[in-house]
Image (cartoon, coloured by chain):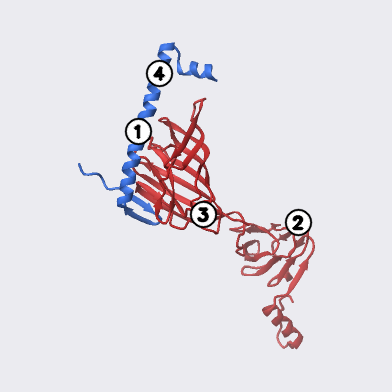
Amino acid sequence: MAIQTFTAAQILTAAQMNALQANDYNQTVSTKTANYVLVAADKGTRVVMNSASATTITVNTSLFAAGDSLRLQNINTGATVVTAGTATVTSAGSLSIPQWGGGQLFFTSASAAVYFPDAVNVSSGLAYISGTTFSAASTVSLPANTFSATYTNYKIIYTVTAASTDSTAINVRLRAAGTDSSAASYSNAGVTYVIGAATIAANNQNGGTAWQITNFNSSDRNKVVLEIMSPQVAADTNFFWDTYGRVGGSQGGGHGNGEFRAATQFDSLTLFPSAGTITGSYQVYGYAIA
Amino acid sequence: MQSPKLFAQDGNEYREFTQGEYEQHAADIIEYERQNALALEKAAARKTLLDRLGMTENEAALLLG
């Protein structure tokens, strides 16, 4: 039931009271099966979209006042997009409402609304696990149990803003129970390139005691991106790497892949320069399994 | 000469290296220097060969490419 305007001496009927109470406790629902343009009577109610095709909910001016709000929901497979008609609609999140999604449309004036989408637990994509800054560190280890049964594969992004020594190798060691593994089981291969140079060189290592990929640059920022595959699985651990920093004393980078050829299960890893210290930050993400 | 202290960023903790980490670091430095020496030796041998052949790096790359 839409909002009522009662006048002096009017009799409030049981039906009206029940209808208003119902809206309070079990919000009035209007289900739409096609594109819908909001009307003033939608204030304080719940608009439910039920369409297998994509739809829109259009928001126009001069229908609502500051402080008015309503609920928007989508119960079918067609995504619904909250669309600014003549009013403005802003949101910190997406204006597209997926099936089983919803949120609150809140008006800050007669011509401006904010859509607050309800938080949804993402079951797919990249999930942030941890991150921190580091300063003048000779080694940087992820927290224990960063790698777990929750995810199989991981992405780690390092931004090294300062390296105390130029052109020292970027090393990575897998880690279990607080100890780096220096077994001679690390191999990696890939290509390296220098900015502005036409030639591409090889990065190659077989049976090393750490993955070793390009160099840190002490006069510019460095980026190291690692994709770690199955570190917690009792099988070989593979990795893919991308770097930007130093190659042969010049600005450059590279990319490639590699493996740790043993069925050891690891819960963390350590990044370190061959000499000196590094300063920067990292973020670790897990690839959701489903 | 006293060796400088080394520090690890271990998760959210910033701490001095453990004894085992110092030992591993020393072994890593030796290995890194060995690899660098090998690389320098290889580069010097390459330069000597190119000089003997009277070729530049680019010419050698063209020949091999």
Which numbered disc flags the more N-terminal residue, 2 or 3?
2
Distance between mark 1 and mark 3 Cα atoms: 32 Å
Marks 2 and 4, Cα distance to the nearest angstrom?
67 Å
Task: Check the image and report above or below for A209 versus B53.
Answer: below
The image quarter in which residue A120 lies: bottom right
**Label 2 to label 1, Cα distance in Å?**
64 Å
Outermost right residue: A33
Query: Numbered disc 3: what chain?
Result: A
Task: Count residues near mark 3 (Cα–Cα under 10 Å), then give few for <14, some for 14-19, many for 20+.
Answer: many
Disc 2, SS? loop
Q: Which mark is residue B34?
A: 1
Q: Which mark is residue B47?
A: 4
Give me the chain letter of mark 1: B
The residue drawn where x is 74% and y is 60% is A77
Three-letter amino acid code of the residue under disc 4: Lys
Residue type at tag 3? Gln
Residue A160 shows in this picture: yes
Residue tagged 3 = A232
Q: Position of residue B11 (x, y in %)?
A: 41, 55
CB-based contact (under 8 Å), mark 1 and mark 3: no
Q: Mark 2 sits on what residue? A: A54
Discs 3 and 4 lie in a common subunit: no
Q: Label 2, label 3: how many angstroms apart (C-alpha)?
A: 41 Å
Identity of the amino acid at label 1? Arg
Q: Is residue A73 left or right of residue A163?
A: right
Contact? badges 1 and 4 (CB < 8 Å):
no
Q: Secondary structure at mark 3?
A: loop
